[in-house]
């Protein structure tokens, strides 16, 4: 083995291993799993991604039918959009080796390996495309792998494949424009598009900018430029065609979800004073507050920052190239503060949390410029040095004078920045850059700089204890297993507690909650209509009524109970998320130490014969009681069901430091003395054993008010953006109920605050009618269901609680029939009179076309290569 090959391998090995070691040492210091009692779970990684990773394992190893459609996805939903956004990283296969609560250990390995691959990919790029070698190449690779954007978005692990894909796509473009060989570019761009189309979109925009820079640098004549433009366009299109098997069905999925939120009008304005972004070049400027509404994460280290500045004064680089690079840099800087360009990089949508997601390309770009400049033969002029020193000094002085404007920045961070800048200046200005201890010092300063930023930044973030995740997951899994062992049919399970809205994905049951960025718009709209929790990208079935429990096939419920040790009540670690007095109408069938399992005998099957009025029901009421009544009336054909809910009055109201006001709904209650606690109590005594509900407007959330029901906290999942329906009493005839409203603010507006009762006998009659003609399912998976149903009239329909999608194909007695959407949510088919066998099968829209396009493109490329080979031979 040659010395040259050994040296290259050593560079690559160090570039891969150093980021892994640095991050592992930090995780061990923070006692992260597998090193201690904490986990890497925080924010979306803990509230969303870990549930999808659990689903990923189950889909691959146990239930392939859920790959295309899953009833764990809220009430049920297509899954290719979820795979394309969250789960197509090839590295996710690592997770198959980690089951149950050890999944957090798998996430650790997944995280550090991505850091390592980032260093490896950038090191490969430097070796192939620059003069960098030895420990200097390792230093730049480590600066790239641990730059601020990747540290800040470690919790968004689904985006972290970008860390190794960007350098490889860039190298493919760089190589193609220099040699005409296009395979590397096409292969890596295709992989990027498949792994995560969202981040790949940003990479594609960045490649357009890089094409401009490289083309200007290599310009010889118009003919050559025209050839390169055609080559760039053709190969980019070929990559998109090769990825069509993912992109086309994903495009359909987006058209139902994220694409509907695209901004229609743009404000031509700056989002903040541009010079403020200088503050993000200092260590440790990433905090929790910066996640929601912060500025771009730009930290790259002092050496890379100075190197990028020196690039524009490097006479070894063509002046036209430096000017073009200057325009590109200005465009990128403008993109991070000017709204129209910010929207461009985010495909026309404002990010929900994690702003300026594209700024990873800025960090790459600056480090790439620095790596071309700070080489062994670089000799900066004194004029350039003086000018850069002046620029840097002005920036430091500006941030120092305005430090009070930056809550994430302290004076010690500025001092740290100055220290590393001084060290970087010394290293860059050193006349000897390749002898003695210099490369070692260069690497040490680079590693120390980025590691300091990493430690300060991640120390600002809290993480979920491993015990909290494992305890909850284990207990919920035991409950799910208990129910699924005794009931093999199709049903849904509700809960009055939660860890995340993706609990159904985590433990594998048909539920009613989900948190996903690809949630179809009609689903949260439906949840808002029925009075349950919905928001931007999530829904949660925590506010069901007896009526919706029946119609939505909620056959079982898990309810946390008071744990007693002797005469002492112990707090249940399963925190309540809903108040469900309706459970008194259901039967306890099993229990554990901390949870009772209830069975709802009134739950309707997944499908049943209903009146055809349901096909024409148009109801946009924001009052959940009216919506539910109209829904039931359309199913039964009985118009009296529209009034199944009736308004009830409170019997008495008392005040404590609150101005007296006896009108309740839409009333404004004010404190008498704003310096003291204030509350008022509402009393009602049910005249029957019917269910009683309270509606709460979206303004009545945990930030504005708190409630006590019979002197105990009224559990309610937050946030919500529509009126919710809260179960407050059931089987409580003659028992006085007390609802206390606490005012943390000087006043409170009781928006949509009304007490209702539900006519239980009328509901039973309606449910019995619908249960009399069930769809008796003989076989079911997540994407195929078949069963028999008997219709006594020719104009009836089979109504289901299967969420509507163009991907469902329905057949009656083997013949394909049209599907209809009911309440803008579910699927129904018209039935002939008599006995019928009805089946539903799901296949993702546009998947076949996508596979065909990708296959034809691949065959065309193979044929093209074969023809060229035959010509040459």
Image: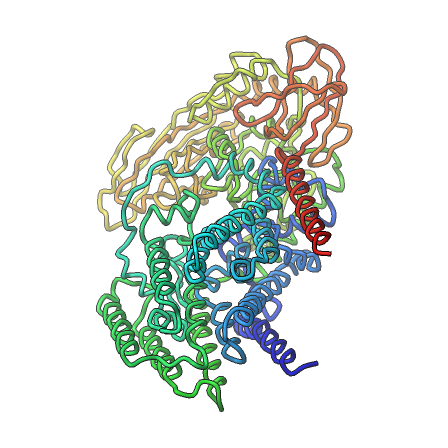
Residue furthest to the bottom in view is 436
Q: Is residue 295 above or below residue 671?
A: below
Q: Is residue 665 above or below residue 514?
A: above
In the orientation shown, which residue stands out farthest toward the top?
794
Q: Position of residue 406 (x, y in %)?
A: 29, 63
- Seen at 61% across and 78% down, the residue is 10
Give the color scheme: rainbow, by chain, secondary structure or one colour.
rainbow
From where the camera sits, is residue 598 visible? no
State left or right for residue 10 relative to residue 265: right
**Is residue 298 toward the left or the right of residue 75 in the image?**
left
Q: Is residue 263 left or right of residue 500?
A: left
- Residue depicted at 52% across the width and 12% down the height: 639
Q: Residue 721 vs residue 851: left or right? A: left
In the image, 57 versus 691, the foreground residue is 57
Residue 139 at x, y percent in the picture: 49, 76
Which quadrant of the figure contains the N terminus?
bottom right
Name above or below for residue 762 compared with residue 159: above
Q: Nearer the viewer, residue 270 or 711?
A: 270
Q: Residue at x 71, y 41 (%)?
A: 483
Along the line of sight, the residue nearer the viewer: 308 or 821: 308
In the rendered image, which quarter is residue 484 located in? top right
**Residue 869 in sight from this viewpoint:** yes
To which quarter of the image does residue 839 belong?
Answer: top right
Residue 56 lies, in percent from the top left, at: 65, 49
């Amino acid at each position: 083995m040659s010395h040259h090959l050994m040296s290259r391998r050593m560079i690559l090995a160090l570039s891969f291993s150093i980021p892994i070691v640095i991050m592992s040492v930090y995780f061990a210091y923070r006692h992260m799993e597998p090193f201690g009692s904490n986990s890497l779970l925080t924010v979306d990684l803990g509230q969303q991604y870990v549930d999808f990773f659990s689903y990923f394992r189950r889909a691959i190893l146990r239930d392939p039918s859920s790959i295309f459609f899953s009833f764990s996805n809220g009430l049920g939903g297509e899954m290719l959009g979820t795979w394309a956004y969250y789960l197509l990283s090839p590295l996710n296969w690592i997770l198959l080796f980690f089951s149950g609560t050890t999944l957090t250990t798998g996430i650790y390995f997944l995280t550090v390996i991505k850091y390592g691959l980032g260093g490896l990919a950038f090191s490969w790029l430097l070796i192939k495309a620059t003069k960098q070698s030895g420990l200097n190449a390792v230093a730049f690779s480590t600066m790239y792998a641990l730059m601020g954007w990747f540290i800040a978005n470690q919790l968004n692990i689904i985006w972290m494949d970008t860390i190794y894909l960007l350098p490889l796509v860039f190298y493919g473009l760089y190589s193609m424009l220099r040699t005409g060989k296009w395979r590397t570019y096409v292969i890596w761009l295709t992989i990027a598009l498949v792994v995560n189309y969202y981040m790949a979109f940003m990479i594609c925009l960045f490649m357009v900018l890089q094409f401009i820079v490289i083309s200007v640098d290599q310009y010889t004549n118009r003919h050559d430029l025209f050839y390169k433009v055609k080559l760039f366009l053709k190969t980019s299109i070929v990559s998109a065609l090769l990825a069509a098997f993912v992109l086309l069905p994903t495009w359909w999925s987006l058209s139902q979800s994220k694409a509907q939120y695209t901004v229609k009008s743009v404000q031509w304005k700056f989002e903040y004073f541009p010079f403020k972004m200088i503050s993000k070049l200092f260590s440790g400027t990433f905090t929790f507050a910066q996640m929601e509404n912060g500025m771009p994460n730009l930290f790259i280290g002092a050496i890379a920052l100075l190197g990028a500045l020196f690039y524009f004064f490097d006479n070894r680089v063509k002046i036209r190239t430096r000017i073009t690079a200057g325009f590109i840099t200005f465009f990128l800087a403008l993109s991070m503060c000017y709204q129209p360009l910010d929207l461009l990089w985010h495909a026309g949508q404002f990010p929900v949390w994690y702003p300026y997601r594209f700024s990873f390309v800025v960090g790459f770009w600056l480090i790439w410029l620095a790596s071309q400049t700070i080489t062994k033969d670089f000799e900066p002029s004194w004029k350039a040095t003086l000018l850069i020193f002046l620029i840097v000094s002005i920036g430091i002085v500006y941030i120092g004078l305005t430090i009070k404007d930056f809550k994430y920045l302290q004076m010690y961070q500025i001092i740290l920045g100055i220290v590393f800048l001084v060290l970087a200046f010394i290293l860059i200005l050193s006349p000897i850059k390749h002898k003695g201890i210099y490369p070692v010092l260069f690497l040490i300063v680079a590693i120390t700089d980025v590691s300091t930023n990493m430690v300060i930044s991640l120390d600002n973030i809290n993480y979920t204890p491993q015990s909290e995740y494992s305890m909850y997951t284990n207990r919920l899994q035991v409950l799910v297993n208990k129910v699924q062992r005794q009931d093999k049919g199709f049903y849904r399970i509700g809960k009055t507690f939660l860890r995340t809205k993706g609990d159904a994905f985590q433990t594998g049951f048909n539920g009613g909650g989900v948190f996903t960025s690809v949630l179809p718009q009609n689903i949260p709209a439906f949840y808002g209509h029925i009075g349950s929790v919905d928001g931007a990208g999530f829904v949660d079935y925590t506010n069901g009524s007896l009526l919706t429990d029946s119609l939505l096939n909620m056959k079982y419920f898990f309810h946390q109970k008071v744990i007693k040790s002797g005469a002492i009540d112990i707090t249940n670690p399963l925190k309540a998320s809903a108040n469900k007095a309706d459970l008194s109408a259901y039967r306890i069938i099993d229990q554990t130490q901390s949870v009772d399992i209830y069975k709802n005998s009134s739950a309707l099957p997944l499908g049943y014969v209903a009146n055809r009025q349901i096909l024409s029901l148009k109801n946009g009421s924001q009052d959940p009681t009216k919506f539910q009544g109209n829904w039931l009336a359309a199913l039964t054909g009985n118009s009296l069901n529209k009034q199944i809910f009736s308004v009830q009055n409170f019997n008495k109201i008392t005040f404590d430091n609150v101005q007296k006001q006896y009108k309740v709904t839409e009333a404004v209650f004010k404190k008498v003395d704003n310096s003291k606690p204030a509350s008022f109590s509402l009393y009602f005594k049910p005249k029957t054993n019917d269910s009683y509900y309270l509606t709460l407007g979206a303004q009545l959330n945990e930030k504005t008010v708190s409630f006590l029901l019979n002197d105990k906290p009224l559990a309610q999942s937050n946030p919500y953006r529509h009126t919710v329906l809260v179960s407050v009493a059931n089987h409580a005839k003659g028992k006085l109920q007390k609802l206390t409203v606490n005012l943390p603010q000087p006043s409170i507006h009781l928006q949509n605050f009304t007490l209702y009762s539900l006519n239980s006998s009328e509901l039973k009659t309606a449910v019995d009618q619908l249960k009399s003609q069930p769809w008796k399912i003989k076989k079911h998976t997540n994407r195929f269901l078949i069963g028999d149903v008997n219709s006594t009239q020719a104009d009836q329909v089979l109504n289901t609680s299967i969420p509507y999608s163009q991907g469902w194909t329905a057949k009656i007695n083997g013949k394909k029939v049209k599907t209809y959407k009911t309440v803008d949510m579910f699927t129904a088919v018209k039935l002939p009179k008599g006995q019928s066998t009805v089946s539903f099968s799901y296949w993702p829209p546009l998947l076949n076309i996508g596979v065909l396009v990708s296959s034809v493109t691949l065959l065309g490329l193979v044929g093209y290569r074969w023809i060229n080979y035959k010509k040459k031979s």
